[in-house]
Image: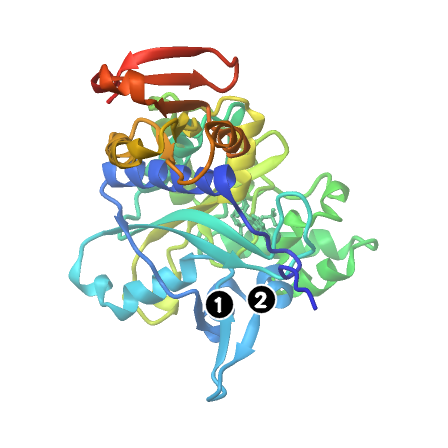
Amino acid sequence: MSFKAPRGTRDIFARDAQDFSILERAASEIFRNRAFIEVRTPIFEDAGLFLRSIGQETDIVSKEMYLFEDKKGRKLALRPEGTAGIVRAFIENRFDLSFPEGKFFYGGQMFRYERPQAGRYRQFNQIGAEYFGNASPAADAEMIITAFEILETAGIKDLKIHINSLGCQNCRPLFRSELIKYFSSKTDLCSDCVNRLEKNPLRLLDCKIDSSKFSGVPAMSAFWCPDCRENFETLKGLLSSCGLSFETDDKLVRGLDYYTKTVFEIRSGQDTLAGGGRYDNLVKELGGQNTAAVGFAFGTERVISAARNSGSLNSFAQKEKVFIAIADEELFKEAFAFSIKYSKTGGVCVSGPVNGKSLTSQLKFADKIAADKTVIFAKTEFEQGKIIIKDMKNKTQSEQQLQNII
Ligand code: ATP
Ligand code: MG
């Protein structure tokens, strides 16, 4: 009998796994610099939380959620995204009452039952942030700039920022009814779009099947109230003042129901790496105080793969791997102590020594574990305070003073 990892999941080893921790570390550094604090929420939540926040008509809730009942019959779901859980935690811990603002970041696994393909998994990772209590477009700008900085730090080139505003409760209803009018006259909509038309017509703009058919569709910008228009202008001014270029994109709506006003995406080529927006009503809708909020998330796997495609993985550089070998068995203890001390420097990654192998088979072993260099402890040289360094790539060899190495 043999087992395989479930469809849409994968095992991540070595350099691939390391890319995750390096990216997460770089992101958390950037978040901390801007006074975001880390939050870790449960991987499963009450299924109703996602229904209420993300919305029944979204792809995530209608098709992609991993739902299950526990032994007490509680209806739970594996989290498909991070925001809902953080908003729940924010309210449950009464942060909405005690702090004037809350800035949180997170990273971790998300689960969506989607058809697996390149860059699309059933278990994947996101890194994201939520900023509560600041209704100003300055908070939107700060989130966009922070997301951009993380992607830039990962070495990704050709980054494009797309922004739009979905309006507020004053101007959006008008736009909504215009959209319904426009789409109702279309006869060739896909079945999903037909279903969404009455409940959430904005979502049609995001439809991967139909979106090419929508020339002449009304633009939200034509319906913005003065407030939303001014907000959007301020946002653009703030981004420009920080040297960021961006595109305004009338058709950008994002997949989730809770967004209001600013929405944004950061893309590299065809790939959407990060998405986010403002959701000023969600905290109240989930039982908290009226609290403005803006958030974003990016797909960690997609960011890593874009970073690799950009070919500039400076911040992802591997450490040199050094194997410690012994030509004389009696030097094992010295070699072992050196190995531990050397690895503590943090400058290289160190493996060995191993017992009971001839030097030839130790060198073969070093090749197999892809060591860049082998440090050889041999009696004659060791007595002069020296070790031998063998370069495993070009097979050259040199001697060095042991004390100089560390
Ligand atoms: P898409 O249109 O690609 O399905 P989405 O709108 O569902 O994306 P969000 O819910 O905004 O995506 O999630 C933010 C980011 O998470 C995406 O931009 C993407 O990088 C990543 N992401 C989403 N779904 C997956 C998945 N199934 N596998 C890997 N990464 C994903
Ligand atoms: Mg999706």
Q: Which residue is drawn at 62% across and 48% down?
A: 120
Quadrant of the rendering where the N terminus is positioned: bottom right
Kindly tell me whether residue 248 is visible in this rendering: no
Residue at the bottom extreme of this rendering:
72
Q: In which quarter of the image is residue 328?
A: top left
Q: Position of residue 24 (x, y in %)?
A: 38, 42
Q: Which of marks 1 and 2 is in front?
A: 2
Pick whichever, 195 or 222, lies toward us.
195
Residue under numbered circle 2:
65
Residue under numbered circle 1:
50
In the image, residue 162 above or below residue 313: below
The kind of residue tagged 2 is Met
Asked whether mark 1 lies closer than 8 Å to ligand 1, one says no
Do the CB atoms of the residues marked 1 and 2 lie less than 8 Å apart? yes
Count of residue discs: 2
Q: Which residue is drawn at 58% across and 60% down?
A: 112
